[in-house]
Amino acid sequence: MHEKTIMLKAALAIVAGLLCMGGLYWPRVYGVSNRRFFWEAMGCASLIRVGLFVAAFVVMHMSAQSDVVVYRYLTNRMMGGELVYRELRTPYAPLFHYVAAVPLLVWNSPLALILESIIIDLAAFAVWLTIGMRWFSPRAVRIAAVLAICSSISWVFIAINGQNQSWIALSLGLAVLALTKQRSGASGVAFSFAVTAVKFLGLLFVPILFFTNPRRLRWMMGFLIPTVLVYGFFSLWGDLLMPLKWVGGDFESGSFGYLLSVAGLDTLDPLVKRIVDDVGIVLLGALMMLAWWRIRRDCRPVDVVAWLSLTIFAFLFISKKSYPSYLLMAFIPACLTLAAASTSRWRLGMLWGVFGLAGSLEGSVYHRYMINQVGEMGWRQVMPHYAEAWSGDPESYLRQVPEPYDFRALWHPQFPGGPSHLATFMILFIDVVLLACYAWFAWRSWQYLTSRILPSAAEASGETMSASATAS
């Protein structure tokens, strides 16, 4: 069963890669008007996502998997009267389960939440496509749209898994759109949704939106007022730091720190986790400040997009918990930046296809194939909480802190033999490919961010963020 799941995701990734390469060289992509291209791109994105949903859950009768099962379980408890952060322990933002409850009132199934994520993802795609058409060259926008539509990352994590990262993408897109229209307060309010209704991870983009805004006080007020009101209300009965305490100790495969466990780094040691956290925060903060220093004098709207791309790829490389699905938070900004910085469609298409294949398989190889190789009984002995999760209790799954994401942990003395060499090689190879892609994409984003010679629609108008603010 585990091998079939991996083969299915691999097949989807290969099909997505082939479609992407074909789309990059299809003359129609570059030959229609912007308006017609917008609606055709929206139609293709909708058709693929809904088609995958129908194929997986209606035709093949697959059951919902991944975090969406947890979303429904916890939201049903909230709907049953439990208070978030008091009776209901959750790793998500205060309003998350209230937003998730909307489709469950109509259809109480994890599939309803997947449909909700698909709708939100399509809305985010429309917003970011609008931003791209206003500030980037037509070539860059169309290449970016092909990358976004024909990516197994979005196919697997949105259309099949229903991940909530697309919710942050919509909030971020609305915030940037308002920012480019000099509506600083509205931009702050729009982004407060990511922090109050999804997860703390949205805070990653706050410095970018703040520093690139010429009216920083207005933006910060727009962001803080709803955020403080929401968290202040929930603080009356709950522990606001519960989400951070819940996942703060996790290590995840796909990160640089996890890869170092091959050389003996003890990822289960609290001191090691603290050091990795501190080093990651310092490196990411230094990179963001360096980026701001390079663009502070003439910040363009395209720089905001490129900075988002640089930040998400750097975060995925540095963070000790680095799921490929986290890219969906700034997925279209990454596509726009890579498309604008690319000089070779062939090379970009090949790299994007390889990245999509590795990103789609990483979670399944570890959580399904790798654990299956170790053996269910061996895993139960070492991680008692995992035994309950294996039995289908989502709440117990959430109590896995810390998770044993360490190569050495797979050879625990209580494991009956440990995983095969093939399984170990597979996860190691995938991690190396992912980290190499993160590093390369971050470098290309940095090059575009700090260069003033690459063409864009924004440069053609001779407009910068500060100039627009002054003129208005």
Image (cartoon, helix red, strand yellow):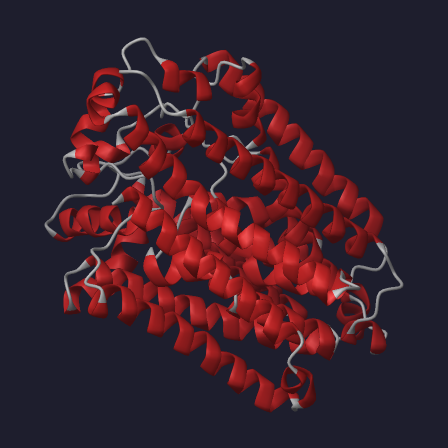
Asked whether 283 or 259 is in front, the reply is: 259
Residue 118, above or below 414: below
Asked whether 135 or 368 is in front, the reply is: 368
Q: Left or right? Give the position of 472 relative to 10.
A: right
Q: Left or right? Give the position of 9 relative to 417.
A: right
Residue 92, given in percent of the width and then of the height, sits at 34, 44
Residue 411, given in percent of the width and then of the height, sits at 38, 15
Residue 48: name its quadrant: bottom left
Residue 82, above or below 371: below
Q: For the point 86% across and 74% down, which residue is it?
A: 462
Residue 94, given in percent of the width and then of the height, sits at 32, 47
Identity of the residue furthest to the left in this view: 80
Whether residue 296 is visible, yes or no, is: no
Residue 54, above or below 12: below
Q: Left or right? Give the position of 388 relative to 51.
A: left
**On-image quarter of the N terminus:** top left
